[in-house]
Amino acid sequence: MRLSLTVNGEARVLELDPRTTLLDMLREHLRLTGSKKGCDHGQCGACTVLVEGRRLYSCLSLAVMHEGEAVTTIEGIGGKDALHPMQRAFLRHDGFQCGYCTPGQICSAIAVLEEMAAGRPSHATEDLEAAPPLTDAELRERMSGNLCRCAAYPNIIAAIREVAGA
Amino acid sequence: MRYDKPISMTPLDARRIVAQPVDRVDGPAKLSGAATYSYEYHEEVPGAAYGMIVPAAIAKGRIVAIDSAAAEAAEGVLMVMTHRNAPRQGSGGDAAPQLVGSEIAHHGQAVALVVAETFEQARHAAGLVRVDYEREPGRFDLAEAERQARPPRGGEHRMGDFEAAFAASPFAVDVSYTTPDQAHAMMEPHASIARWDGDRLTLWSAQQLPDWSVGDIAATLAMPSEHIRIISRFIGGGFGGKISVYADAILSALAARALGRPVKLALTRQQIFNGTSHRPATIQRLRLGCDAEGRLLAIGHDSVSGNLPGRSFEEGAASQTRLLYAAPNRLIRNRKAVLDLAPAASMRAPGEAAGLLALECALDELAEKAGIDPVEMRVINDTPHDPERGPARPFSSRKLVEALREGQRRFGWERRDPVPCRVRDGRWLVGMGVASAIRENYVVEAKARVRLDGQGRLTVETSMTDIGTGSYTILAQVAAEAMGLPLDAVTVRLGDTRLPRGPGSGGSWGANSAGTAVYDACMALRDMLAQKAGLNSTDARFEGGMMHGGGRSLALAELAGEGVSAEGEMLPGGLTQSYAQASFGAHFAEVGVAIDSGEVRLRRMLGVFAAGRLLNPKTARSQAIGGMVFGVGAALMEANVVDRRHGLFINHDLAEYHVPAHADLPDIDAIFLDEEDDKSTPLKTKGVGELGICGAGAAIANAIHNACGVRVRDYPVTLDKLLDGLPPIG
Ligand code: FES
Ligand code: FES
């Protein structure tokens, strides 16, 4: 099947087996291997990317469902020599060890702050009328779809907190 | 260097770069997605075909028929390999042959490999392979198998008259604890890409110990080790799960040779649980007796674990008890039973991780009987030397008591009410727990090379791996400090078996062993540079990219000329025999147990550790916390659930095998006490990576008992095991 979409600001046209997931399209066809495959079943978050500005498990989504959409992967967030503030905060706070869950954590973290700024509540939000407070409980709840077996968790939360200015 | 006597001063003692909390040097690559893991070498290996294995659907028996016709006819399929057409492979010893016959030894073992042009085609065709089996009954229940458990491999460790002393102890507990099978659950699945160039094989493969893996693969493929190269530059976690060679490495190599084309193969998450290894379940009997002051009179620790027939690994869950506490009468042994589950193997702190879950809770049970505070109980039973060998074998360093005291103070232990159920916070019963941490210190052989170029840049090379441990960073720190260079003048190259043989990542020996090899190479390089300048190396000082001495200052870049290189190595000497060596610590945990549901929430946790000199306090803290979180998982949620009818771990994915997530973790911190251990390595380091898990889960289980009065002896401590014992709501 033919598919046109934008990846990291670049227009792409691909001829794809309709069974190809968005994650495999990125990793195997576009060779953007920054997005990781930890489970291929929506259970770990390593494959998290931003689609139309919202975070999504790219392993749970077929590529052809994203015709015309804009996808941002870790490669589009910041390169080695031009790290995004979230990536820099992860570096300072040692918010990673093996690095395999890390691109997903960073994509999620960036989206979490946007979701909170937009006033979207989470399971941890007590007052649904007010803007969600930037508490650790909120951040931990919202980040829980991204597993880290190295357990950089406290450092990840510290990094997000710093970027959020909380 | 052979390290057989403690070193005095070294250039690392300046601690300008070493022992500083610098950011990881491989951080930018990992944070930007530029770091390449094993499945991701598109540029080096273009055009790889995709493999997918078919796992056995029974635990024991044989294949009676395989119909691969539909798979072979499917679009894009290049080959289907089964035991009928798989090449002959080596067996025995280190070999890990695949698809060698119709016998099934465990669920999840590969029974076929499908290779196709694309991943989607391979996955689809794998589902078309039809396998008929004849089942045989298997042994899946450790409690049943225990009766046939073999006598201990290394003999029992007896001292005094255990039975008599235990029987005569004024206070005693005789309790059994069980720990379940656990999954490493590292985030990167096992993956390999194989390419042949003539009779030479290159494998990009996630291997913690790549040089060992070369040996295993050579034995399997019956080819010389020199013809195999493994590249493991980045490994997405291992925790022991990537020590042995599995189907991805062997089958990608066999298929690539048969097809004359590179093949890439990753195990699916589901395949990993039953197709690779796990930490085996244990049943542990603790018999502890003490006097009225809490002094242990008798320690009995008896552990049994299972493994497949013919496998040598056993979970030495009783072993650490030989070194942890004093007592004149002792009986400590590990036994092994035969099971037909997937292979059992090392997982982060094999032995201690499971053993301390039992010992440290049983000790609390005894302390409670004797009316002694749990922290005091541990302090009272501290020992300055190996309890079995006596003062002839002192500890090289041991700060267990200091760690307990520091933690006690920082955690607010004095607020702990020794009587359960008396501290309430709304619907939560609140309790505190403590446990000791010990992890034996390992130092193994290692080699490294350093090369200084005419620009004054230093390259460090060893086949050591970085599995998240910080190897890239700490080795750069050691080299920069030793050579008086800034950190960014050092490049570290790891994870390639063409480089000098590193120790690999396992047993927390990486920094000790690879670090010393790098140090030794730098010292040799310093000698060479001093000689070039006509100086005695003892008169030369290396600082700020210069060598100072004899009234002169010379830039290293100039001295290097065309480039100079030196090799170094670590050869452990007799210091581990003359000194007992281990890292120590203490865990403190506070939990809430919901009085209505039995739900357990960890509220805060602190680990205080002493592990020699820390090459990098930032990465060491991260590793310690990582280990503690493994302990949280072990205490509260992690278990491979054995389906005893079909003989497999039934919860074989990350939705059903629970590991701690962000929301499971409250404030958790780890601190280190100052310590330098010159009996361990010239770097004065000890092992760090596994210490954090040791005892962590027991501190939580002890806190649960302190909160609600229920003592669960069957891990993990889930709410169903607490509900019946909770006090009335009121
Ligand atoms: S790979 Fe997508 S959630 Fe795990
Ligand atoms: S850094 Fe290893 S899994 Fe998160």
Image (cartoon, rainbow, N blue to C red):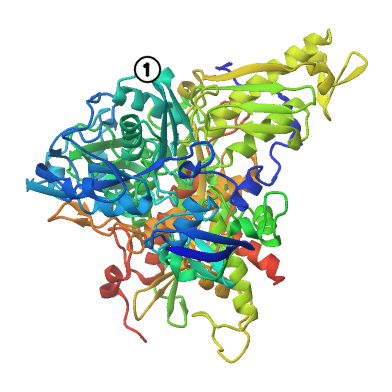
Kindly identify the residue that appears in the image at 65 percent across and 79 percent down.
A117
- In percent of width and height, residue B602 lies at 46, 67
- In percent of width and height, residue A89 lies at 68, 58
Residue placed most toward the observer, A117 or A71: A71
Residue B536 seen by the camera? no
- In percent of width and height, residue A84 lies at 69, 59
Q: Farthest residue toward the top?
A: B534
The image quadrant of residue B643 is bottom left
Residue placed most toward the observer, B497 or B484: B497
Quadrant (top left, top right, bottom left, bottom right) of the N terminus of chain B: top right
Is B481 situated left or right of B588 in this image?
Answer: right
Residue B633 seen by the camera? yes
Q: Farthest residue toward the bottom?
A: A129
Residue placed most toward the observer, B225 or B526: B225
Q: Secondary structure at mark 1?
A: loop
Kindly identify the residue that appears in the image at 14 percent across and 54 percent down.
B646
* Pointer 1 chain: B
Q: Farthest residue toward the right?
A: B551
Residue placed most toward the observer, A59 or A142: A59
Badge count: 1
Identify whether B225 is placed above or below B125: above
Kindly identify the residue that appears in the image at 34 percent across and 78 percent down.
B597
Is B461 situated left or right of B554 in this image?
Answer: left
The image quadrant of residue B203 is top left
Dot 1 corresponds to which residue? B224
Three-letter amino acid code at the position of disc 1: Pro
Quadrant (top left, top right, bottom left, bottom right) of the C terminus of chain B: bottom left
